[in-house]
Amino acid sequence: MNPNIQTKADSTTQLEPILEIRDLITEIRVPGRSLRPVEIERLVVPRGQVVGLVGESGSGKSMTAYSVLNLFPTAAASIHSGSIVLDGVDMVKVRENERVKIRGNKVGMVFQDYALSFNPVITIGKQLMEQLLTHGRHENAKAKVLSVLDEVGLSAEVFSRYPHELSGGMLQRVGIASALVCDPPLIVADEPTTALDVTVQAQILELLKSIQKERNLSILLITHDLGIVAEICDLVYVMYVGQIVEHGTVHKIFKSPSHPYTQGLLQGASSVQSVGTHEIRVAIQGSIPGLTEIPSGCRFHDRCPHTMEICRLQQPGFYEVDGLQAACWLHDAEHSHG
Amino acid sequence: MAETTLLEIHDLAKYFEVGRSLFKKKQNLYAVDGVSLYVRKGETLALVGESGCGKSTTGRLILNLEQPTAGSIFYRGKDLAGYSAADWKLYRQGVQVVFQDSHSSLNPRKTIRHILTAAMFSSGTIPRNKAQDAEERARALLSEVGLRPAEVFLAKYPNELSGGQRQRIGIARALSTNPDLIVADEPVSSLDVSVKAQVLNLLDTLQKEKGVAFLFISHELSVVRSIADRVAVMYLGKVVESGPVAEVFDAKVHPYTEALISATPIPDPDTTRNKKRIVLPGGVPSPMDPPKGCPFHPRCFRAESKCATEVPPTVEVAPGHHAACHFAEERFSSYESMT
């Protein structure tokens, strides 16, 4: 690594975010038209922070993760415009052969389900070493893999095991090890505990928390589970049909959400702590629209309990409300009733 | 049991034979291993536990989709083992099911009209020559589950509906035979937060209106807390604790119940970060080789030497509240002294 870059990063740790997304539009080409699953004005992951990206299925949160790596599950998807600056490098502008070097080295990815992600006929150790070798780090590759396995709480014995010999929780640990093996400063984790049982999920969350602290990692955590966000995130971005509708610190978002969608999500989230039995709060009617039927104006207007005339016509910009940023006309002085 | 008991199961067991080959001796997978439960009329009993604990198999045994290895199931006081063909017909009308995956449980090539009326015809709820009655009933059911205007939905195919709407069709189909018990196997697990609340609310409303009982199988404790009257916690094919939902969740008599609840994140940063968290070591042991003594002892934070050798008896710590732990009474009295 270039020592000059290292010092520059150190001196500006507080200022320069590890990841900054601006005016990102990701599109999927289908016959006759193009759909836009992601339209993000701005999303920032500060260094050493855990940023949660929450939304329901179909909100575009996973597509955002793929966009950061510029690596899509389908050839029909690509970045249309915008910038994704990762540790000073714009992932949209650089050539593919540069990106290959950045993936793994600058950003690691943790996926939801590792049951089918690993090659079943190659040992775990070999698959983890492969990453180091592709990035030209031949020296002590095995020692490095063993130390990462130890870091994620797996014994050295796992090195020579095959994927099918491991349980779901162990495979998820291997997945985290594989994201960490090249020591990237940023991890993008897409629903890392969704496929796991709750007691195993608790183990993985504890592990992520401790690794984050020790390495001062930045994490972009994509999840639909508000409990996990409350547990581990510093900042939260709430996504709805491809767009960010509200963002701010985790305490403020949970305490006094300003966007009706966030309010509805939080009210509808059931908790083991709820007081009364048979107490179900339905906060949002209807379901999330598909990309072919995006409503005009504010995309949430047809499900919103506070819809006004302007909501149908025009998309709201962001307003600052008690330290949160919310894209909602209710907070516009001219249009709000209050 | 009391008059109000609808379904009762005694020491129910289901072992699956696995790994049988030329070179291997056959092995048993103890999916359900001595489960006793009851469901009262009009109540919701939740069956919770992690994957592989036997909660779905218990549901399938009740639905007669699997044959029990041992034990018995009583519906309205009569043992299923002695059922005649006429009894079975009534049972299939009385006990219905809603599955988790609404996509694969609805025939993609049939309209909603066909899906709903076929259930009424084949169960004998409405005779086949009364097609008009069936259609009217289908229309009424769709309105009841919140799919309006019903005429529009009757002509649709399952793939034209969203996940939440399909799950409502599944519920309407279950209701079409006028059941008094619905086995709902993870009915909201694949739904999004906002839709999940809508479907749970629908189930709750239907219960109040029709007095139907639910056996609600779920791995989500937060959902169970909001919908169930009573809960049974399963681990490795056994019920480790059961009782009224609020008391079980508060008292947490069995250490496994305590661990499950403490592992579930709470959607509130202040509470969830300050609570004491029990992180259990390892994963659930294989149901092919369950531990001796108490099945939970290798992962238990309260375990003592006798837990490894003696199977704990199921004791009643409070009326209707049972737990299978050597320290159940001690743990319950310490909870009582705290409140």
Image (spheres, coloured by chain):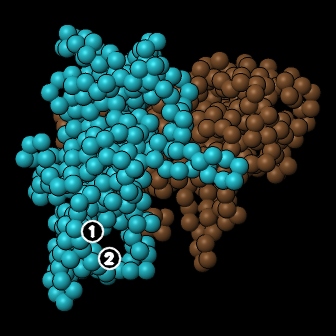
Chain colours: A brown, B cyan
Observer-nearest residue: A102 or B284? B284
Asked which secondary structure carries label 2, the reply is helix
Give the position of the N terminus of chain B as an image quadrant: top left
Observer-nearest residue: B4 or A241? B4
Under mark 2, the amino acid is Ile
Observer-nearest residue: A12 or A50? A50
Report if residue B61 is visible in the image. yes
Q: Which residue is mark 2?
A: B115
Asked which secondary structure carries label 1, the reply is helix
Q: Residue at x 40, y 66 (%)?
A: B105
Q: Which residue is mark 1?
A: B173
Give the position of the C terminus of chain B as an image quadrant: top left
Residue A144 image point, x, y percent: 82, 25
Residue B63 image point, x, y percent: 31, 58
| Horizontal side of residue A26 vs B77, given as left or right | right
Q: Residue at x 34, y 17 (%)?
A: B326
Which picture quadrant has residue A1? top right
Observer-nearest residue: B290 or A229? B290
When the figure is inspected, residue A23 is found, relative to residue A274, above or below; the finding is below
Which picture quadrant has residue B263? top left
| Horizontal side of residue A25 vs A273, given as left or right | right
